[in-house]
Image (tube, rainbow, N blue to C red):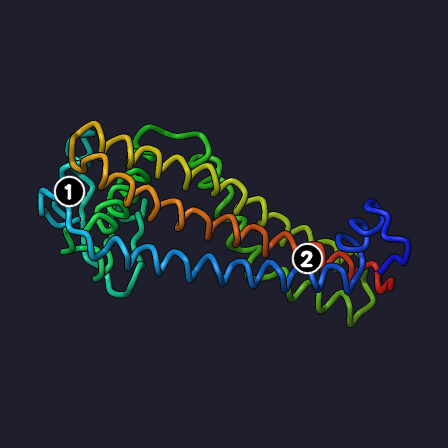
Amino acid sequence: MPENYNIEEVLSWFLTSYWGTTILMFATIIFAMICSFKVKMTFAKYDRVSSLRGQPAHIIARQILDSHGLHDVDVVRTHGHLTDHYDPRKNIVALSDATYNSPSVSAIGIAAHECGHAIQYAEHYVPVRMRGAIFPVVNIANRTWIYMVIIGMFMYMPGMIYVGIAAFGLAVVFQLITLPVEFDASNRALATLESQCILDQSELKGAHRTLSAAALTYVAGLMVSIAQFLRIMAIARGGRRR
């Protein structure tokens, strides 16, 4: 690490050197773990708060979808804890065991969020279209980048290494595009819950905190990927500066 502690040199050391990027990566991993813990704790807290209407999340999801004319989108149950998602290929909102029959504030918030994704696809929300357009390429890149980097290092082929790094970079871009998609889905969810009087103001605060904690995990995931990208770049450059 630079001895004079010039802010620009310190920043450069963290972003370009092997040990600097390694420290940065571990720091982001710890942050991601904290975010994951926070979302579980927040969900558990508001899962103990039942909404005044007392309707389970799957009924609320059906109501939201129908109010937006999405009668063809099915609401199904899926195994797991916090495995809720919208699948555009099957056109389903899948709610986890912890969410499906729960009338809690957190469960309803999450169900509304997944409905928000269905609405995004129906309205051709631009970031969703961008993410969908690059997904096939990103899927291949995710599976192959590490092999390109390893082969490039063993065969002394710098070009192959940087192709692998570029493939990983594409996956990082995909995560970056995912952020506005997730934040927008949460905003749509909260607006719908309020406009349709599904939750009152005090309950909306709980739903907002649950969705905010969940959104932070996407931010943390992006930070981990960026740190890993910088570390791979440092390794490729032989950046073992102290």
Q: Secondary structure at mark 2?
A: helix
- Disc on res. 82: none
Q: Residue type at mark 1?
A: Ile
Q: Which residue is mark 1?
A: 60
SS at circle 1:
helix
Residue placed furthest toward the right: 4
The residue at 78%/49% (across/down) is: 11
* Identity of the residue drawn at 47% across and 50% down: 218
Residue 22 coordinates in the image, percent (x, y):
71, 64
Given this view, does label 2 or label 1 mark the residue nearer the observer? Answer: 1
Identify the image quadrant of the C terminus.
bottom right
Say which quarter of the image contains residue 8.
Answer: top right
Q: Give the x, y percent position of residue 186.
A: 35, 39
Residue to which mark 2 is pinned: 164
Q: Residue furthest bottom?
A: 154
221 relative position to 60: left or right: right
Residue placed most toward the observer, 50 or 140: 50
| 61 horizontally vs 237: left or right | left
- Which of the two labelled residues, at mark 2 and mark 1, occupies the earlier sequence position? 1
The quadrant of the image that shows the N terminus is bottom right
Please state the horizontal and vertical placement of residue 61, each as a whole percent of the image: 18, 43
Q: Amino acid at mark 2?
A: Gly
In the figure, 91 relative to 242: above or below?
above
Q: Nearer the viewer, residue 44 or 111?
A: 44
Q: Quadrant of residue 98?
A: bottom left
| Residue under the point 76% across and 55% down | 14
